[in-house]
Amino acid sequence: MPTSSRSSEGGTRRGAAAALLAPGLLALGVSFLVPLVWLARMSLNRTVGPAELQTAVSLRSYIDVLTDDFVWEVAWHTLWLGALVTVLAVVVSYPIALFLARTRSRLRGLLMALAIAPLLTSSVVRTFGWLILLSDDGIVNSALSGLGIIGEPLTLTNNVTGVVIALVEIMMPYAILAMIAGFGRVSKDLEDAAGSLGAGRLRCFVRITFPLSLPGVLTGALMVFVLTVSAFITPRLMGGGRVFVIATEIYDQATTTLDWPRASALSVLLLLLFGVFLVLYQRLFRMVEGR
Amino acid sequence: MRRMSTRALLPLLLVPAVALSACSTGNASDGADDGTTTVRLMAYATGGFKEKYVKAVIQPFEAAHPNIKVEYDPVVSSAEMLGRLRTQKSNPTIDVVIMDLSVAESANKEGIFTPLDPAAVPNMKDLSEHAKVRDNFGPGVTFDNLALVYNTEAVTTPPTSWNDLWDPAYKGKISISAPPQLDGIGLTVILSKILGGDYTTSIDPAIERLRKLAPSVQTWNPQPDTYTLVKSGQVNLALAWNARAQLQHDQSNGALDVVLPKEGSIMQVNTINLVKGSKRASDAQTFIDYALSPEAQALFAAEMFYAPTNTLAKVDDEVAQRTVMTPEKLKTMIAVDWNRLAEQRAQWTEIWRKDVISQ
């Protein structure tokens, strides 16, 4: 995020800010940092035999993970799924976000609430909802066959298609929120100016609106991407055991195969990956902002 | 906009509060004031196990031992139990654990469990050979077996053989929990045997056969669980565990039924274990001995259709027919070295993913 002009303010303000931040930082430290350190430590332990955990300082788990073809396959699959869901979610959310950011309708509050309301329901419930909607005799398949478009029901659940559909919908509120927040600079005045200078609506969008909305798009995309790459519930529930992503792999290792060092090593590597994407995002953001 | 998002965040803020309050209820008092001890038992939370175990074993035990109370700590899976036990290894609050044999073996090796004293647990000597565990570590307390379940409305001719899975009538209506779940591991063992081989030498023939099954399988990861899918007719044929399936059969008025295929099956064993460092080891072993007694074993079998591990347990014929305890059924069971399987689990899981599920 861009820094504001806070640096010019006095030292007492800064002290007060520190005091106000302390409880939050403490809570974060206890609930986030300590488990993270514990996780990192666990990744250096060793698993002997099927699942016997031995305390050690060893990079064995990292070497095993990084030399395992299947892990690489899963990693690529995860990134590919992340990219696909990000593109689809951003494309579908963009018009909604732009409309919500621009509209002066009295219903704006209500519409905004509708767009964000899905966040109040857990993604477990929403995934189960999609399982029902997309099943062989669900509403989507019966509508399509009722219209005579398909003969046999399409297999839309228990595979990657279902995972993508459900994830896109689940990610939309995040994308919309992030984009609205980033659309602050898209000014109607600039569009009006472009229009009065002879630009058509399409040209106006391509040359003015879209470039100005890019920071919002990037923020939305990053948010969706990170959430998708770490998504567990939807690939697990909707994938029918056919969709393997890093999160489901970590879950299996941690809770079924009980190889905690391996699960921890995978988690640490995933975290590093997020770090890389965060840096890339900041670079891109600065590039877009700096124009 | 700002007001809106604050409101949207409120429920999120409540989550940690609820979670914290849930944690604090875990520490009930020891009840030491009135001379009673509380033995803490960790066992399964799912599939009616808790309700049935409390009724069939814990309540009669407490009636017979007024100075010992048993508190049931329900946990979803054996793996999660091991996770919790690992975190409290230095200062355990749990005394007795019922969990799957292969997970228990890891706990035995990690020093989480300790061997039982045969003098304090005399019922151990009457246990079936399949229930005995090395060095007096916690022995088998229940026997279960892998079975086929089917939707009784959609399926007019009940399946009789594992080969029925390949019947085209079930195409797209089959559910199998793939490895690392034990269901898929078990099916690999059974198929190896049916195809004339042995899982200890090669599983290639079984995998080859499973490849042909793959296109017929609707899900390799039934959600929310196998029984729900079969009862609702979302799938018509599935791999499942006998005890839970029998219970589901009764609770669903027969919407689902269970068969033990004629080629036999594999047994799953739950062991009852004493936690190392338990401060109530003596009372805990009194409870373990009771849990292994013929009476307790027979009562629980009648409630939940787990076959007893105590050879002296007397069970109604009708109940026995619905478990693996009849001699004819026991004979068809395929011997399984679960510790060996635990070691091969990761490898088999990978083979399944590469060669079976990807089909």
Image (tube, rainbow, N blue to C red):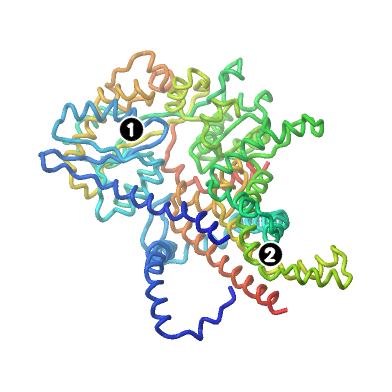
Residue A217 numbered mark, or none: 2
Residue B192: horizontal and vertical position, in percent? 55, 33
Measured as percent of width and height from the top left, residue A132 is found at 62, 35
* Residue A202, image quadrant: bottom right
Task: State whether residue B145 is above or below residue A37.
Answer: above
Residue under label 1: B131
Q: Nearer the viewer, residue B340 or A259?
A: A259
Residue most extreme to the right = A198
Q: Nearer the viewer, mark 2 or mark 1?
A: 2
Q: Residues within 10 Å of mark 2 (few under 14, many from 20)?
A: many
Residue A89 vs A278, above or below: the answer is above
- Which three-letter amino acid code belongs to the residue tagged 2? Val
Circle 2: element type: helix
Please give the name of the residue rendered at 33% of the width and 50% of the height, measured from the top-left corner.
B21
Judge by depth and name the residue closer to the eye, B356 or B71: B71
Residue B293 in the image: x percent, y percent? 24, 27
Q: Secondary structure at mark 1?
A: helix
**The C terminus of chain B sits in image quarter:** top right
Q: Position of residue A152 (x, y in %)?
A: 76, 31
Of B269 and B190, nearer the camera is B269
Type of the residue with mark 1: Ala
In the displayed structure image, the side of residue A94 where residue B350 appears, left or right: left
- The one nearer the camera, B111 or A195, is A195
